[in-house]
Amino acid sequence: MPLKTAKTSAKAAGSKATASKAAAKSARTAPKAKTAAKAVKPAAKPVAHKPAAKPVAVVPRVEEPKKVLTQRQGFKTNEFVVYPAHGVGQILAIEDQEIAGAKLELFVINFMKDKMTLRVPTAKVANVGMRKLSDPVLVRKALDTLKGRARIKRTMWSRRAQEYEAKINSGDIVAIAEVVRDLYRSESQPEQSYSERQLYEAALDRLSREIAVVQHVTETEAVKEIEGQLAKSPRRGAKAESEGAEGGEADVDADADGDDAAVADEAA
């Protein structure tokens, strides 16, 4: 019995020693666990990101209006213009039409006196010579031209007639005034030939219509102003004076008939 008791006591002591070792081991391990717990950092709070700034929209440069302006050459609706072959007209509208599969922008021009409407492509106005009305300074220059002496070339009438017609259709107001000056006949002078009269009236009509629009008067008033300037010109019955420096031009007697007055210079 005493032997069993001793063994039992020894076992109990061994168990206690084992328990003590386990407790010591647990004690050593516990701080490490705490440290590990401390090492685990809490998850960082999510940072609220500001929304990215919207990119500034770059507005592309609009080239179309510039193109249109270039094609139209600054002409606008309801504006009066000069079309060389027909004189003064008014732009009624600017419209688009499809012709032969191509889209064209057109000026719709009305010539009230001729009762005619013309459609001109805006891209062609420079080629046809369409222009704005003359400014007052140029109109005054044209009126002053009328007071000068008639300057008629010493050549055949047919050739002079072509030159007069070219001046009338040039659209140049000063050149048209020169035709009016050269073909004008006063009441004391013989009547003009039919061809002369036609050219004179065409030039007078072109000149008076533009002056009337620029000065905001009627065509009748414009014609009276033109005739008043012509009346101030030197006597047309004066003896011709040769002016070789002027390329064969001379101030000639305008009393002769237009078809016979010129002296042919081919034989000279």
Image: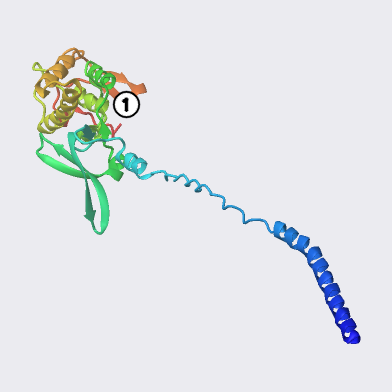
The answer to which of 26 and 220 lies nearer the viewer is: 26
Mark 1: secondary structure: loop
Q: Which of 97 and 3 is in front in this view?
A: 3
Query: Relative to 195, is 5 on the left or the right?
Result: right
Q: Which quarter of the rendered picture does the C terminus lie within?
A: top left
Q: Provide the residue designation for mark 1.
A: 248
Instruction: Name the colouring of the figure.
Output: rainbow
Picture quadrant where residue 60 is located: top left
Which of the pair 266/143 is nearer the observer? 143
Q: Is residue 192 left or right of residue 174?
A: left
Residue 249, percent from left and from top? 29, 24
Q: Pinpoint residue 212: horizontal percent, then vertical percent.
A: 16, 23
Circle 1 packing at 10 Å, graded few (<14), some (14-19), many (20+), is: few
Identify the residue at image location x=12%, y=41%. Answer: 116
Residue at 38% in and 44% down: 62
Find residue 219 and report its horizontal and vertical position in percent. Answer: 11, 24
Above or below 183: residue 43: below
Q: Quadrant of the N terminus?
A: bottom right
- Residue 178 lies, with reference to residue 232, above or below; the image says below
Given the image, on which type of amino acid does mark 1 rest?
Gly
In the image, what residue occupies the spot 49% across and 45% down?
53
Locate residue 207: give its quadrant. Answer: top left
The quarter of the picture where residue 265 lies is: top left
Marker count (numbered): 1
**Residue, x 25% and y 22% (percent of image)?**
151
Which residue lies most toward the front here?
1
Question: In the image, is 230 to the left or to the right of 31?
Answer: left
Q: Compared with residue 193, is residue 122 higher up or lower down, i.e. above or below? A: below
Viewer can see residue 14: yes
